[in-house]
Amino acid sequence: MSSSTAEKHFPTRAGRLSKQVGAERSIFAATLTNAEELAAALGQSRKDWWRELQIAYLNKDLFAHQGQALGNTWLQHNSRHLKDSGRIKVLHLKTNICPTDALLHHYYTDASTRLYRRCHQALETPFHILQECTYIKLPRMEHNNFICKQVCRLVGKYNQKATIQNEQHIMSPEDIHLKPDIIISDGDSTIIADIAVPWDDRPQSLQRMCDFKSIKYDCQQPLYPDKVVTVVGLAFGARSMLCTGTIRGGTSLRTPSGHVKRAWLASHALVGSLICLNRFMKV
């Protein structure tokens, strides 16, 4: 690139790189007037910024590979050093994707580079990677089905006279086709329960999912005119988190709340979101 061309594109490039490394380094970058000096300074600042980011996650088992004893233990329910918003950041750290100038150029000029690299069907967001992508559909179904079996096992253990139906196809009075995960019939009472495993395990998100499930299947109450119908939504977070709505729902199923927690932890250890996350994090 000639000097005239470099000077021509200097303002745009300076602004873009300054935004990349952060406001505190932009003050230093603003004092430079030469394009080459600016590129060198911002390049070093970018490396320092990325090194600081990696240091922040050291000794937290982020880089342990699948199959190792401590692999991905940062996803445990008692971990506080990593939030949901940092998962994509961890992906970049694990695969050593450094935001170089060339990568940024392709990102802004080629729309396909912003798509998830496994399916190329949607933007690379935590929601798509952990819940919406076709590559994760089968593990999520296995996860949901296993939790459903665990809940049914607990209900049968503490209420042996109850009749339990799984994924019963029902047409509501409004001609809405629904398929709740569990229908429990015991004498004059009927409990309709549906299970969700959202990618976001914040208590507010889990509670919203419980309320959504309750409203969705509440229209089935007229199908049982002579029974006391209870509609329960159960939401199990991606890192063994449970909300108050799920705890109350477990009580409605006549199972001790502590057993609901232990059943979820057992399912998490067997086919939990660690499997889902490991599958798309493998290099």
Image: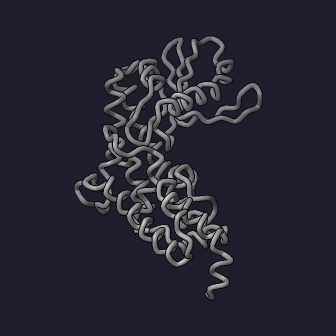
Would residue 161 be found to the left or right of residue 120 on screen?
A: left
Q: Residue at x 33, y 53 (%)?
A: 56
Q: Position of residue 61 (x, y in %)?
A: 28, 55
* Residue 266 rendering spot, x and y as whole percentages: 31, 39
- Coloring scheme of the render? one colour
Horizontally, residue 227 falls left or right of residue 270, namely right
94 displayed left or right of 17: left
Residue located 50% across and 51% down the image: 130
Residue 131 in view (yes/no): yes
Q: Nearer the viewer, residue 27 or 262?
A: 27
Can you name the residue that lies furthest to the left here?
69
Residue 165 in sight:
no
Towards the viewer: 103 or 195:
103
Residue that protrudes farthest toward the bottom in the picture: 2
Q: Quadrant of residue 122?
A: bottom right
Q: Position of residue 3 (x, y in %)?
A: 62, 85
**Where does the N terminus fall, quadrant-wise?**
bottom right
Instruction: Please name the residue shown 42% across and 55% down the image.
Output: 277
Residue at 49% over, 75% down: 37
Question: Eyeballing the image, is 96 above or below 162?
Answer: below
Report the label total: 0
Judge by depth and name the residue closer to the eye, 31 or 95: 31
Counting from the top left corner in percent of width and height, residue 191 is at 53, 21
Q: Quadrant of the C terminus?
A: bottom left
Above or below, comparing residue 89 to residue 174 in the picture? below
